[in-house]
Amino acid sequence: MAWHINKIALIFAVLLSPAFITHRCYCSEIEKAGVYSVIELTFKGPQQNETDVPARDIDFWLRIRHESSSREYKIHGFWDGDGNGRTSGNIFKVRFCPTKTGRWNIVEVYSNIPILHGQKQGDFLLATASDHPGFWIVDSNSPGSRWYMRSDGSHPYIFGNTHYSFLSGYQKDNKPSGNDIAADITANAEYFKKLRFTLHCDRYPNPDEKPFFDDNGRLTDQGNYSHRPNPRWFSQRADIAVQTAWKHDLIADLILCGPDTEDSRSILRANNNGGDPTPGLKYTAARYGSFPNVWICLCNEYEIKTPKYTEEEIARFARIIEKYLPYPTPLSVHSTPRTLWSKKFDELPAWNDHQIIQKKIRNLPDSADVIQYTWQNPDGQKPHNKPTVNDELSYQGKGDKHTEHDTIESHLGVFLGGGYGTTGEKPGNKLGQYFKGCFNPSQHTAADNLKYLREIIDTHISFWKMAPDTNIFSNLNPDFRGLAGPGREYVLGTNKAHKNIIANLPAGAWQVIRYDIINKKAETLTKTARNRFSFDSPNTRAVLFHFKKQ
């Protein structure tokens, strides 16, 4: 009898223990949303303020598993002030992106802080069907793995734009720019597929709002304090940009170290945290790594401005952030014109899924050739076999002396080289939309032509099955370039008048359409071309001929 009494007492002791109460499972549904949406889960933790360092000192993550046990993600959380933009509070968040319909169970919630540990463990979320295309993934079945695809298997083509400092809301001479972050994102999404911008601060910092706290809790732009992020900056600026971009399926290409100032470029140096950038990188991954539209660029021109970073350092930073990214977030670094993509990266363990180059080009052949040159990796032992993006291909305006037609022609060229390109509007040095935002297509006049070209590609061309090749064509001008999907589909780009070009077509009937990108006009030349087909290119700088087997 005594044994039974002791057993009953033990059971009651366990049931009433704080540990059991914390961890018992009510199994309640806490959220319901579509696949590839971003679900924000809110937790209550210890009170934190401007002098605390939760990004470094508080470890907090959960594991969430699909009911089929086929997928599981470990996702880190982050401190978010009071959850409404204040710089003190007890709100912690985890952002989760369901990748499959059905029930997702929170199987573990871990923290080194008892109040967070086990909170919501056992709860579940329901994911419903949606038409969102999902994450950007390298298509390993594309020729040379040179193209991206989405989770749903679709292949949108990418032209990007640049607004380096638009999160700050300021421009030259410490004047407000008058931009609206959400409006800029929405307007860009009408014309482009990607927008690159600095996540923190840069040449035109906001005098009143800063992305970090210093050791005394004061606001600062100094990136050496990247271990002390200010939740107000991110919730009221960066979150608006990323979330609005998700809504419009625009890539938010987040540059962690900005293009110019030492303050902005010190994010990865992290001198005030003993040279360890882990807290800041983990924070970025936790806050934005669950968004299917987010890409990450570790640094702009990593090797030429203060502070400079070596290839070994960049690879180390990449390995750190990859530990905290739960999904296949595209990751790379921005190189300078003189190096394109450094061969030193080839000597290190692979870390990037694409390569970013910078080469400002005005014409079709050079734009195509620099992409193919980088992809072929002439200094290495094998091709890079990764998508290549020229992220400073042509800034339109007096700053770089690129005309509207320069920008249009070079972007047709980057497509024909088997890569992607990015533009910007630059009326003067460090001036214009490429820094401040305020997107205006009446000033960035190439934008509507790039939209026209991108929509032609998306609607009509199976480019992800194609690679640079002009072998079926003869009597070509040396400046012409093309892509081939052998036996099925071909494209040829021209930039000047040329008579009697010959397409030596494989067997069958072929449709041939000519697209004048400058004048935004299309003309079907024939639907019954066979064998040897002769045609002329017109006297305009950006024309695309599309050959497709009927």
Image: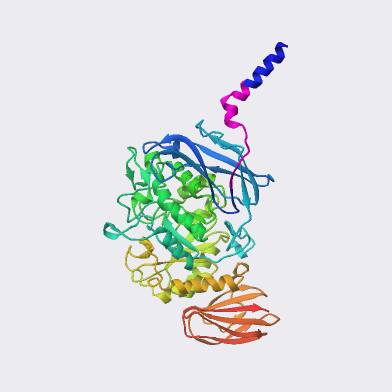
Would residue 546 be counted in the magenta stretch? no
**474 over 438 or under it: above or below:** below
Q: Position of residue 82 (x, y in %)?
A: 42, 41
Q: Can residue 269 be seen in this view?
A: no
**21 over 250 or under it: above or below:** above
Q: How many labels does the image show?
A: 0
- Quadrant position of the C terminus in the picture: bottom right
Q: Which of 159 and 20 is in front in this view?
A: 20
Toward the top, the furthest residue is 2
Q: Is residue 45 visible?
A: yes
Q: Left or right? Give the position of 303 relative to 93.
A: left
Q: Give the range drawn in magenta.
A: 13-31
Q: Left or right? Give the position of 497 relative to 212.
A: right
Q: Position of residue 478 (x, y in %)?
A: 51, 79
- What's the coloring here? rainbow
Q: Which residue shows up at 56% across the image and 26% down it? A: 18
Image quadrant of residue 214?
top left
Q: Where is residue 39 in the image (x, y as percent from the top left)?
A: 55, 48
**364 over 146 or under it: above or below:** below
Q: Left or right? Give the position of 483 relative to 299.
A: right
